[in-house]
Image (cartoon, helix red, strand yellow):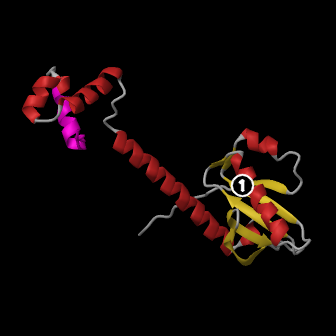
Amino acid sequence: MTETILDEEQKKQVVNLLRKGMSSKEISKILGFPMRSIGSIKAHLTMGTYDENEDEVIEEITTAHETSLSIERDLQTFLCNDLEQIEQGLKLFQNGKEFNTDVGRIDILAIDKKDDLLVIELKAGKAKDGALGQLLGYMGFISNNIAKGKRVRGYIIANDFEDRLKYAIKGLTNVELKAYKVNFSFEDVD
């Protein structure tokens, strides 16, 4: 038995005819689509689970995700060009931008003025408590493989932080949260 999958335009045709009160049998006869496909759409309409804007919603989610990644990448570039904005004396570790490890890619790996290592995890929007686990994993890897007895600290830099994350770092002396703020200025153009 072959399954016929209707494209978006065909689905819209079926939905319009169903909303006009036509039966599945009539629609099948007029459009030549299988009753099974029409019945499926009709069932979703009846249950209220048919989403005509599903593609638009997916596109919005994809765009938001891409924007978030772009903001994080721009923040990373901005900070790598002037790490002293975060902390005086901070320098980029060799290949410290997107530093690859066995446990993932560190956004920024830096060296402080005491020659200790600083792992920086960037989040474009509001950081969740999972960011702490990610950061601690990176810090553990750096401690075991690169630090050679040096102290390893960590920063999570985000626009905002979930309360749960704020509480989670309370007992940690080597992890800090830093909030970034974006300021726009505007000029008249002649």
In this rendered view, identify the residue nearer to me: 68 or 49: 49
Q: Residue at x 17, y 24 (%)?
A: 24
Q: Amino acid at mark 1?
A: Gln
Task: Estimate the x, y position of residue 3 in percent, counting from the top left.
Answer: 24, 40
Residue 135 lies, in percent from the top left, at 74, 57
Q: Position of residue 46 (x, y in %)?
A: 30, 21
Q: Secondary structure at mark 1?
A: helix
Q: Report the span colored magenta.
A: 1-17
- Residue 14 on the magenta segment: yes
Residue at 73% from the left image edge and 71% from the top image edge: 83
The one nearer the camera, 152 or 44, is 44
Relative to residue 160, is residue 111 depicted above or below? Answer: below
**Mark 1 Cα shell of 10 Å, populated few (<14), some (14-19), many (≥20):** some
Res 2 → quadrant: top left
Does residue 152 appear to the left or right of 108 in the view shown?
Answer: right
Judge whether 35 appears above or below 127 on screen: above
The structure residue drawn at horizontal position 22% and vertical position 37%, both measured from the top left corner, is 11
Q: Is residue 55 left or right of residue 101?
A: left
Q: Please name the residue that numbered disc 1 is placed on.
A: 134
> Which quadrant of the figure has residue 81?
bottom right
**Residue 58 drawn at (x, y percent):** 41, 45
Name which quarter of the figure residue 1 lies in: top left
Q: Is residue 11 magenta?
A: yes
